[in-house]
Amino acid sequence: MTKRIIAILVAAILLFLWQFLSWSVLNVHGSEMQYTDKQDAVLEALSQNLKEGSYFLPNLPPGSTAEQQKAYMENATGKPWATVTYHDSMSSNMGMNMFRGFAIDLLAVFLLIWILGKMGNPSFQTILLSSLAVGFIGYLTIPYMNTIWFETSSLGHLIDAVVQWGLVGVWLGWYLNRK
């Protein structure tokens, strides 16, 4: 039991450290948070026209008919569109965000180790490939799927999937197979 707890803690720390590096020092996700010198004007317009929430623009009101949906698609095709997540005020509670992020990393590694435990005595290679598979499954079903529908870049998320779950796989493959 102690061995699994150590495996989980170290792997979660590896995930957490990579995520910190990826989003800050290395700026792997820079394309997802671009700067515009028009940000003050955009934020002013949003604050006057939106309440807190996520939006797809243009969009139809709830309850639109099939005819309205068809007309909307014909009218919107080839014109500008946007996805917007708007908040009334910025919160800088990094402590709570970091705590929640680390808690999720702990849970993710716990689930991976639970799966690995169902394999009997997996080899280093099986652990590494299983860890990478978990990363690819997460990448393909959320960030990459979003690139299909919302035409965004997910390269940073792919790099994260390979690096962070590769690091976890190397650690777990080595540590769990020690005698």
Image (tube, rainbow, N blue to C red):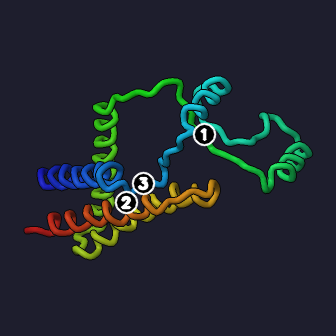
Q: Position of residue 130 (x, y in %)?
A: 34, 68
Q: Position of residue 171 (x, y in %)?
A: 19, 64
Q: Which sits earlier in the primary sequence, circle 3 or circle 1?
A: 3
Q: Examine the rendering and report whether any part of residue 153 can be seen.
A: yes
Query: Is there a contact, CB below 8 Å, between mark 1 and mark 2?
Result: no
Residue 164: quarter of image: bottom left
Disc 3 marks which amino acid? His
* Crowd band around label 2 with a 10 angstrom C-alpha radius: few (<14), some (14–19), many (20+): many
Marker disc for residue 160: 2
Disc 2 secondary structure class: helix
- Point out which mark residue 84 bears: 1
- In this rendering, does residue 109 appear at all? no
Nearer to me, 66 or 155:
155
Residue 29 tag number: 3
Label 3, secondary structure: give it. Answer: loop
The residue located at (48%, 55%) in the rendering is: 31
Sequence-first tag of 3 and 2: 3
Can you say whether 178 is above or below 55 in the image?
below
Q: 57 left or right of 12?
A: right
